[in-house]
Image (cartoon, grey):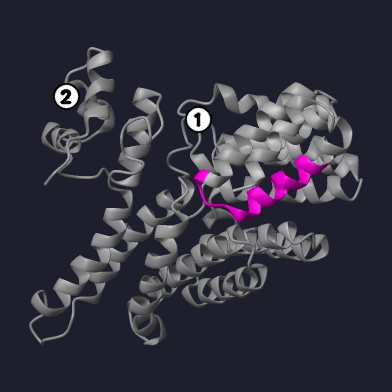
Amino acid sequence: MVKHNSMLRSARIKKSWTPEFVSKQIGVSRNTYIRWEAGAQMPRLSSLDALCRVFEMSPTELGFAHSGVLNVADAALDDQGERSTHDETQDGTVDLPASLEYWTTGLVSCWQWYMIGGQTELERLVPTYLARLSRPTLMPGPDQKVAASLTSQVYQLLAMLAMQRCDFSSAQSNGTQAVVYAQLAKDWNMYVAAQLRLATIFSARKRVGSALIAYNDALHRINVDNDHISPVLHSWIFAGLAEIQATMGREAEALQLLKLAIAVFPSEADEASAFLSYAYCDRSMLYLYQGLVFLRLGQPKLAWEAFAQIDALRPPPPERIRAEFLKYKAYTSLVLGNMIQSCIYLEAAAKAALAINSELIFGEIYVFYEHILALWGQEPRVRALAMLFQK
């Protein structure tokens, strides 16, 4: 039974907009938009992004977070299974390009689901993509590069899922595989994204030197293929390097790299065209790294101002990004000596981490709680936080 998207319809009615008006703003037909409200069809990622911008609301607020994203990813596999037996070419072989197109759509949905916290569901689903892609990835032919690029995406997803459950060995192994398959595909956007994921994993393991190598490998590829690499990936590299330099106490270098990250990030008008489904990089990424740089440089007031910028973002960022900001707001409040604010944000961050099943973020929050406990352990507000970690 189809479930109507009452949230999308309500949002439209509150603005006194007609379906014709909204469909024109998004660039789709009226019938397509009506099917979204009816729950009969999910918008593509580009259309969903446009929809969020028009309404200035998140996918969750428009009713798309949990009502169909994972179903699209599942359907990409189910539909392909039917195609294997029913949609063959004249010589009896499976239509591989069509299958790859289905899997591409499914992986877009997997990344959406990852950003809103679907850890448990993706642990089940993502390995099935790897099994389907194995043969076309290793079989020479006109579709091998596309298959290898998709396989790199799958390994990146597996790496991120492993990191969230604190399995850093698997995360690093899968991240390395992602780099290898991106090279096989000669997809240099995918290669840079894979290197950035490796850098993220190394940073989480406190292996700053290895993270720096991964960032530099990504930067080298951009220097070779500058015109073919998305500007959001340029910005991500510079932002990550800025944090590394700040960690090493190199203030001038860190601030210069941060300026570069901001300078190369696409303008709001060009942001949608630079968007990559497998590399979620919007302005919240800039604010996050800006805050981290100032934290590493011992400037918590400037860090707080940077983290606070997320509150004005419309649509608001997805749950995974929100959890990161709440975590660092809690820590910055701690550094600033604001007990009440530390407690408020730590509680919110812990709940957000549990909601997205992130052991990594939850563990980091617990470390912050130990610091708060050491400073204000006799305060009732602080003692009450213990309940968060007794489940």
In this orientation, which residue lies closer to the viewer: 194 or 318? 318
Q: Which residue does the image show at 50% across and 72% down from the upper left?
A: 186
- In the image, taking residue 350 as reference, residue 119 lies left or right, namely left
- Asked whether the viewer can see residue 262, the reply is no
Mark earlier in primary sequence (2, 1)? 2
Q: Where is residue 336 drawn, in percent x and y?
A: 84, 26
Q: Which residue does the image show at 57% across and 59% down from the upper left?
A: 193
Residue identified by numbered label 2 = 19
Residue 383 lies in the magenta-colored region: no
Q: Residues within 10 Å of mark 2 (few under 14, many from 20)?
A: some
- Numbered marks: total: 2
Q: Where is residue 219 drawn, in percent x and y?
A: 69, 58
Q: Which residue does the image show at 28% across and 61% down from the upper left?
A: 74
Residue identified by numbered label 1 = 268
Residue type at mark 2? Answer: Pro
Name the secondary structure under disc 2.
helix
- In the image, taking residue 150 as reference, residue 70 lies left or right, namely left
Q: Where is residue 231 drawn, in percent x and y?
A: 57, 46
Q: Where is residue 26 drawn, in percent x and y?
A: 27, 31
Q: Quadrant of residue 198?
A: bottom right
Residue type at mark 1? Answer: Glu
Up-down: is 2 above or below 21? below
Q: Residues within 10 Å of mark 1 (few under 14, many from 20)?
A: few
Q: Which residues are magenta?
A: 355-370
Q: Quadrant of residue 262?
A: top right
Q: Quadrant of residue 72?
A: bottom left
- In front: mark 2 or mark 1? 2
Up-down: is 202 above or below 242? below
In this orientation, which residue lies closer to the viewer: 33 or 234? 33
Name the secondary structure under disc 1.
loop
Q: CA distance from mark 2 to mark 1?
A: 25 Å
